[in-house]
């Protein structure tokens, strides 16, 4: 052995040098690369959290993301806010919008056939499931491939199928739909988030897209599935199996039991991005973290969810509100129905809730009313806030067939059930637009007074004057006749009874 070593020692030394030098170089390179990343993380930790500046707002966890948001999915109230409008690269979280548009415009059993562009516009080193030109899978399978395996060629094929032309034309549909959803910082140029300087969004916009995405039961189910399985068919010959890299799923390192759905994203430029939804005790929250280093995006998302569920309450206004005479609202509250036994005109929506921090009381919440709701079924919209920070809104609906909270009965009713069948007397409450009612009453009163004066004028002046004049003339004529007529003797005067 030693003889062999001395005989071939120059060869062993050469091999050792060839191994050690690259290893040392790689270690130095990784160290050099890690230094700016650590510096960037430290800088991101210094970015202020806007919600921390609200007096008495719950103290937020420290998040290393460059941009992050925690939003109530139902009301749109923001519980945690950090740099939420900075325009950043969304990477594969773009696919949330792509899949949402697909289910809104197509049937699940439609066949998606993959064109040359869909396959060859997908970089070989990006996420894909090795589909080939001319192969076809159902739209539902395509959704699974996009959301579970983050397959870029599947996103291209889905976009071509929905647009009916090329995936580039699909971008117009994306931008239009994003605007409808309330996005204000976004511009999309492709359906999968591959790097492009003109393709960007924000944490706020991803949360707004998430509100619509996670409202769809099918998309929630797919985006919470760990394993993709596409069996071989006549139009797709391979048995495809792929796994999600999401660590929030059951059995993973950062598994979160209340998770509704989630989508990861990563490129060198975008770094790690995560959009997730969780639901607990009726509260449904959406968390978005952008520009993170793995696996911090998962830890920070769990921290945000726990922060929201532990520090905020979901308040149903129809069950909680006791003050209906809201300042400067044009409404008033009364214990008596001003129309006697009439049915209530308006009712609070029983499904609308607001999010209130546990560090404040409901009496600290401010409210304003707007009559311009844009919905013909709504009389007004009551908006709740704390120190100018939006907490949610509740609609005041016209009493109709839709399910609502009746001010008369104090219970949830719908349609024909709106009549109070309980014989127990209950306080009747009604909302009235005071300004309009006063104007109507003043107008009616003015007309009535005018009619009374007119009638009095004609009755008491015109006709009474004529009547007096006629009577005087009649008496005068009668006296003249009596003077001219001779007095007749009383023929009964001489008889004695």
Image: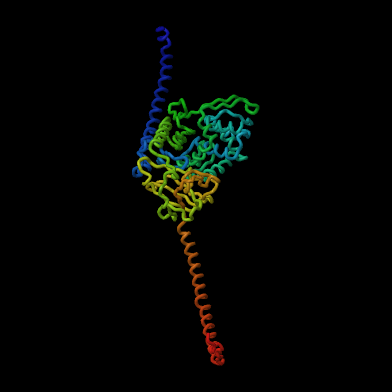
Is any part of residue 204 visible from this angle? yes
Q: Quadrant of the N terminus?
A: top left
Residue 111 location (% of width, % of height): 63, 33
Please determine whether, in this image, residue 479 is positioned above or below residue 346.
below
Residue nearest the viewer, comparing 150 with 409: 409
Q: Position of residue 96 (x, y in %)?
A: 52, 37
**Image check: 306 left or right of 401?**
left
In the image, 281 versus 252, the foreground residue is 281
Q: Residue at x 38, y 26 (%)?
A: 28
Does residue 395 appear in the picture of this structure?
A: no
Seen as rendered, the residue at the extreme front is: 497
Q: How is the image coloured?
A: rainbow
List x then y, in percent, for residue 314.
42, 40
Query: How many marks are shown on the rendered structure?
Result: 0
Residue 309, image quadrant: top left
Instruction: Spot the residue most to the left.
Output: 56
Asked if residue 281 is positioned above or below residue 26 in the image, the reply reads: below
Residue 14 place in picture, x, y as percent: 42, 17
Q: Nearer the viewer, residue 185 or 2?
A: 185
């Amino acid at each position: 052995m030693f003889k062999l070593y001395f005989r071939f020692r120059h060869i062993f030394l050469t091999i050792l040098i060839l191994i050690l030098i690259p290893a040392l170089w790689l270690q130095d390179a990784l160290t050099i690369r890690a230094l700016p990343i650590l510096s960037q993380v430290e800088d991101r930790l210094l970015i202020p959290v806007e919600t921390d500046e609200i007096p008495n707002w719950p103290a937020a966890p420290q998040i290393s993301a460059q941009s992050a948001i925690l939003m109530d999915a139902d009301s749109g109230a923001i519980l945690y806010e950090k740099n939420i409008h900075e325009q950043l690269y969304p990477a594969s979280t773009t696919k949330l919008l792509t899949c949402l548009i697909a289910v809104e415009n197509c049937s699940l059993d439609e066949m998606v056939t993959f064109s040359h562009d869909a396959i060859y516009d997908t970089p070989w080193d990006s996420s894909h499931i090795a589909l080939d030109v001319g192969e076809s899978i159902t739209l539902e399978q395509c959704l699974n491939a996009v959301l579970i395996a983050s397959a870029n060629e599947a996103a291209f094929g889905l976009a071509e199928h929905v647009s009916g032309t090329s995936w580039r034309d699909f971008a117009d549909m994306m931008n239009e739909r994003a605007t409808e959803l309330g996005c204000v910082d976004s511009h999309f140029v492709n359906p999968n988030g591959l790097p492009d300087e003109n393709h960007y969004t924000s944490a706020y916009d991803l949360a707004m897209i998430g509100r619509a995405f996670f409202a769809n039961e099918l998309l929630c189910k797919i985006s919470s599935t760990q394993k993709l399985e596409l069996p071989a068919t006549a139009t797709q010959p391979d048995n495809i199996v792929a796994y999600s890299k999401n660590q929030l799923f059951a059995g993973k390192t950062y598994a979160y039991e209340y998770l509704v759905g989630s989508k990861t994203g990563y490129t060198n430029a975008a770094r790690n991005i995560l959009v997730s939804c969780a639901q607990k005790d009726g509260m449904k929250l959406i968390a978005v973290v952008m520009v993170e280093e793995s696996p911090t995006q998962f830890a920070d998302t769990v921290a945000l969810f726990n922060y929201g569920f532990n520090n905020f309450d979901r308040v149903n206004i129809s069950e909680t509100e006791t003050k209906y005479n809201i300042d400067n609202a044009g409404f008033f509250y009364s214990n008596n129905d001003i129309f006697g036994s009439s049915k209530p005109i308006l009712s609070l929506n029983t499904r609308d809730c607001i999010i209130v921090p546990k560090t404040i009381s409901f009496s600290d919440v401010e409210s304003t009313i707007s009559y311009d709701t844009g919905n013909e079924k709504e009389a007004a919209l009551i908006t709740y806030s704390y120190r100018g920070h939006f907490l949610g809104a509740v609609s005041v609906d016209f009493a109709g067939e839709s399910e609502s909270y009746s001010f008369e009965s104090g219970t949830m009713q719908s349609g024909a059930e709106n009549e109070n069948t309980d014989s127990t007397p209950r306080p009747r409450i009604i909302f009235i637009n005071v300004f309009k009612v006063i104007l109507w009453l003043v107008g009616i009163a003015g007309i009535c007074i005018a009619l009374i004066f007119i009638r009095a004028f004609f009755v008491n002046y015109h006709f009474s004057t004529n009547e007096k004049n006629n009577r005087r003339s009649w008496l005068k004529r009668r006296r003249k006749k009596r003077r001219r007529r001779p007095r007749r003797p009383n023929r009964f005067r001489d008889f004695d009874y």
